[in-house]
Image (cartoon, helix red, strand yellow):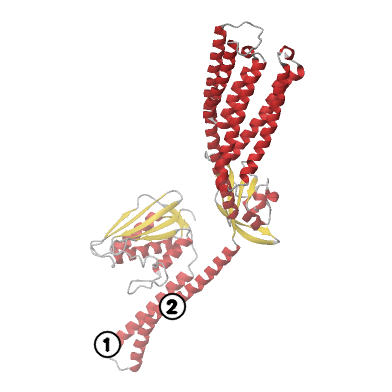
Amino acid sequence: MIEELENRVSALIYVRAIVVTLLLGSIYIFQIGYDKLPHPEYYSYLIAALYFLTICYAVTLGTIKKLYKSKKPDYSQVHLLNAFKAFAYVQIFIDVTAEVILIYITGGIESMFSFLFPLSIIAAAIVLGRRSCYITATFSSLLYGVLIDLQFYDIIRINTDAVFTEKDYFYNIFANITAFYLIAYLSGYLSNKLHRATKRLEERDAVLSDLKAFNKYVIESMPSGIFTTDLHNRIISFNSSAQEITSRTLDDVAGKKPEEIFPFLRNFKDHLDRVEGEIKKDGRTFPVGMRISKLKDSSGEEIGLIGIFQDLTELKAMEAEVKRKEKWAFIGELSASIAHELRNPLASLKGSIEMLKGKKVSEEHADRLMGIALSEMDRLNGIVTDFLLYARPRELHKEEYDLNQSLREIVTLMNSSGANNDHVTISARLEGDRVIKGDARQLKQVFWNLGVNAMDAVSDRGSIDIRTSGNGNAVEVVFQDSGKGINHDEIDKIFYPFYTTKEKGTGLGLSIAQKIIEEHGGKIEVESEGEGAGAVFKILLPTQV
């Protein structure tokens, strides 16, 4: 505020010097009407006085600033503002007085310099604001009106070439005073609007500057590399992290296309997504992950691209370490599970053989022990077979076949199976043909495992619903039952090898099913609201794999 007012006061001093030089000095230099002035020497004195005042104003302006800068800051701001305002008022009042003197020198009512009053009013509006316009207009009206009245009543003698009547004097005063106040109103109104607009612009400029600085600091402080391009796909910005990751400065990359810096982007022009690749730095190659998206302005118009990338060296190393630890942890858990599963049938088998070896049992009891031994050996064989199937799955024999037809056969087997309770309702919504490409035998095993699990889960008067849906690229198979459901603690474990809640289950059925589906490029998911709410198994398979 103070700096702005100081600039306006300084401008007032300079503009006054220019006006005096151009208007008054030109008349003096070129002698335009100079010989007709009643007292030409007064005109010269006035010009000299105005130049002298201009010098005094410039010196005073510097003195005011020095004086208040030497004082304590608590007083300086308010007093300095008031000092500048008072200084401006003094200049304007002296200007109006000088204009009256000039009009007196140049003929009074017939002087051509009455247009200088509006200049002072406009100057007051620009420097001091709306209120000063009316003060300056009033002061100008009083001085001009008194001068013309004194001339009319011949109290002061001003020689004129023309003869003016009483009406001429009255109209001259009325017209000029009216013009003064109209100019004061208009200039004050425009000045007020200008000051408000200037203030709003300054506020917005400050906010914009802060926002730009904030954005710059944020972008420069981000650990990820960031670059932007224009509509011609030329790099225009490259933050500090980008320069550190690539060992290239902004000058090195400015104007180049991103694929010149990141070669793996050469085949990445038709879509915007995440991509990973490698770049060279200091003679070594390292992985980079990048996401590219459209850069838009405030109106939503596309103005280029923005890329955000990171050096994935440490992340890849951490991922490899995590995978290695997960692998060993999985092997440990799997070993413990295998040992647990093998220990029970081995214990039963050992007990039966020891009793048979002692030959202290009856023939009938011996036959029963032999049956237990054979049953446990079959159980061991089943565990080993399932584990080998999980650990070393059979090669896929892909062929086109009707998925719905395969599911209809599963439904028929479920209805005819002895495991099926007569009071369980099995419904199938398998309309039309759904031809996919895959290993029919292995997928049928998956569907059978899910069907058996559903039948084991439902009780009397329960229901199982099997349905398919999808589009040209994928098909979804759903097994939904109204059984006992799966609690939230178990739902994340049911696909683990050897995890089972059944007394005679090996816990490999769902693990094998998941592995087969994944080998077909699909995925299997389970949903359940908890115990007693039933379960939904969803299989998503691509039609072409």
Going 33% across and 74% down the picture, which residue do you hit?
Answer: 504
Q: Closer to the camera, 427 or 307?
A: 307
Q: Which residue is mark 1?
A: 364
Q: Is residue 270 visible?
A: no
> Which residue of the protein is positioned furthest toward the front in this rendering?
155
Circle 1 Cα neighbour tier, 10 Å, few/some/many (<14 / 14–19 / ≥20): few
- For marks 1 and 2, the one nearer the N-term is 2
Asked whether 457 or 358 is in front, the reply is 457
Residue 337: x, y in percent?
A: 42, 76
**Viewer-nearest residue: 18 or 341:** 18
Residue 336 badge? 2
Q: Secondary structure at mark 2?
A: helix
Q: Is residue 422 left or right of residue 31?
A: left
The answer to whether the residues at label 1 and label 2 have Cβ atoms under 8 Å apart is: no
Q: Is residue 509 above or below residue 437?
A: below
Q: Amino acid at mark 2?
A: Ala
Residue 142 falls in image quadrant: top right
Q: Position of residue 75 (x, y in %)?
A: 56, 45
Quarter of the rendering containing residue 281:
bottom right
Q: Could you tell me which secondary element the residue under label 1 belongs to?
A: helix
Q: Is 192 situated above or below 38?
A: below
Eyeballing the image, is 54 above or below 23? below
The amino acid marked with disc number 1 is Glu
Residue drawn 39% across the image and 78% down it: 341
Residue 172: image location, x then y, percent = 57, 12
Which is closer to the viewer, label 1 or label 2?
Answer: 2
Measured in 3D between alpha carbons, the distance from the residue under mark 1 to the one under mark 2, in whole angstroms, is 37 Å
Q: Quadrant of the N terminus?
A: top right
Q: Position of residue 475 (x, y in %)?
A: 42, 53
Reply above or below: 215 against 517: above
Residue 133 in the figure: left or right of residue 473:
right
